[in-house]
Amino acid sequence: MMQHKSILIMAGGTGGHVFPALAVARCLMAQGVPVSWLGTAAGIECRLVPGDGIDLHLIDVRGIRGKGIGTLLCAPVIMLKALIQALLAMRRLRPGVALGMGGFVSGPGGIAAWLLGIPLIIHEQNAIPGLSNRILSLVAAVVLEGFPGVFRGNKSQYTGNPVRSDIAGLRPPELRLRSRGSAGLQLLVLGGSQGAQVLNQVLPELSRQLGREMDLRVWHQAGERHYAGTCDAYRQSGVDPQKVRVVPFIEDMAAAYDWADLVICRSGALTLAELCVAGIASILIPYPHAVDDHQTANAKRMVAHGCAILIPECGLDLCKLAEIVTDFSRIREKLIEMARRARELAKPDAASAVASFCLEYRNA
């Protein structure tokens, strides 16, 4: 009866964890494999997962590192409560495999799977592994990597980071970019699913300056919390409202990437995977407070391959940024070459590869 058991996906918090996990879930369900999900009530999974017809089971857990002494003192209670909840959920579900795709839920969920003898697979998205995955790698059946060489040992396998199938299906960058000619620049601004305040502050003024020199069009994902303020900043800058589109969140990322000539963004693992699969040049401004500074490590992989420019937030200068964007607008072949190099790093079949490992260990 093992072949009828479900795959339990453990992922939560931000879109950076949930969207790759959803890509794997959809791949599994397309093969008739039942999927259930372990998440948290505070995460974006509560909005996204039920829409795919996946049973969502919630536990109470939150981040501990960098949250202050009070949270650190409460950590044993927080983790014990989450572990008990995860154990109870798994006892009910009896999955054939537990797949940890990141977020705070993966820690207690992974330990619960190990205690119950459920095969555990973990996927590390970043170039520097998080604390939970470093611990879980000791008991996992297999460790999957979004970047090559993150873990040592024969348990690690490089799959890349899963992306949504509609992004993987985009036209090659040469066709997209050359079809637009050389007039103007279409700039996509992404701060992750929650937005990035530094980009929300800088881009309106950048758009004002460059709008006097070129036909610049901007599509800006500002995040729910910063949406109104970002709209006000663009209005006050005097930018032509017909050339700027500000949204709290972009649901159809494939359409956004298909539209974009250039992307300015943070360097979360999911965003970089999508940039590579789509094939788009980028200016990366890593989130400086990411745990272990993993966003900078992610970005350096892209820069080393010649498909991105890295600007630390502490070194973000409006004049320098304007110079870089202007250079891209004048030399379209540079955009195309960097986009082509990004696609060389792409792993468009990553979701299928992760799903295959789940099925292999479920049926073992």
Image (spheres, rainbow, N blue to C red):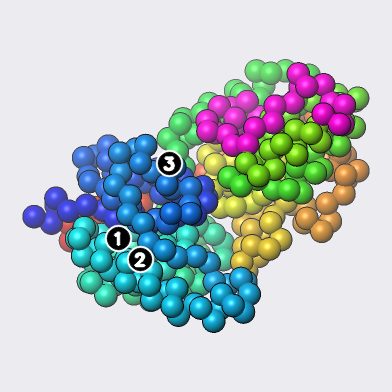
Instruction: Using the rendered image of the protein, determine whether residue 349 is visible from the camera's viewpoint.
Output: no
Kindly check if marks 2 and 3 are in contact, taking CB atoms under 8 A apart as contact: no
Sequence order check: which comes first, mark 2 or mark 1?
A: 1
Query: Dot 2: what SS?
Result: helix
Tell whether 326 sits left or right of 162: right
Sequence order check: which comes first, mark 2 or mark 3?
A: 3
Asked whether 254 falls inside the magenta stretch, the response is yes
Instruction: Using the rendered image of the protein, determine whether residue 295 is visible from the camera's viewpoint.
Output: yes
Q: Quadrant of the N terminus?
A: bottom left
Residue 109 — which label? 2
Q: CA distance from mark 1 to mark 3?
A: 20 Å
Kindly check if marks 2 and 1 are in contact, taking CB atoms under 8 A apart as contact: yes
Residue 294 — which label? none
Residue 48 — which label? 3
Q: Amino acid at mark 3?
A: Leu
Q: Which span is picked out in magenta? A: 235-260
Asked whether 62 falls inside the magenta stretch, the response is no
In the rendered image of this protein, does residue 339 appear above or below residue 39? above
> What residue is pinned by disc 1?
98
Horizontal and vertical percent position of residue 52: 34, 38
* Mark 3 Cα shell of 10 Å, populated few (<14), some (14-19), many (≥20): some
Q: Residue furthest left?
A: 1
